[in-house]
Image (cartoon, helix red, strand yellow):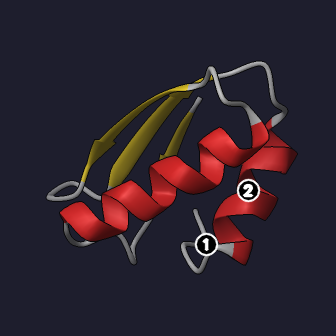
Amino acid sequence: MEFHVEDMTCGGCARGVTRAIQAIDANAKVITEPPNRSVKVETTATQQQIVEALTEAGFPPR
């Protein structure tokens, strides 16, 4: 699945996004691209779980 995270602007933000996703699924593969503000995720978690985790971490996806 892929998300656009407008508030992910730097490497620190990307680490926060990755931590939020891996808190739900430790084995999730997360590829962040801060310049594009995109996040690609391979996970067993549902899209809703990822959206909730990112929103709670301060990085609401679109």
Disc 2: which residue: 51
Q: Amino acid at mark 2?
A: Val
Q: Is residue 39 above or below residue 29?
A: below
In this orientation, which residue lies closer to the viewer: 19 or 7?
19
Say which quarter of the image contains residue 47.
top right
Pointers 1 and 2 in contact (CB under 8 A)? yes
Q: Quadrant of the N terminus?
A: top right
In this orientation, which residue lies closer to the viewer: 48 or 25?
25
Q: Answer left or right for 36 relative to 48.
A: left
Say which quarter of the image contains residue 42.
top right
Q: Is residue 27 visible?
A: yes
Q: CA distance from mark 1 to mark 2?
A: 7 Å
Q: Answer left or right for 11 relative to 16.
A: left
Q: Is residue 27 above or below residue 46?
A: above
Q: Amino acid at mark 1?
A: Pro
Helix, strand or loop status at disc 2: helix
For the point 20% across and 61% down, which residue is it?
Answer: 11
Numbered label attached to residue 46: none
Numbered label attached to residue 60: 1
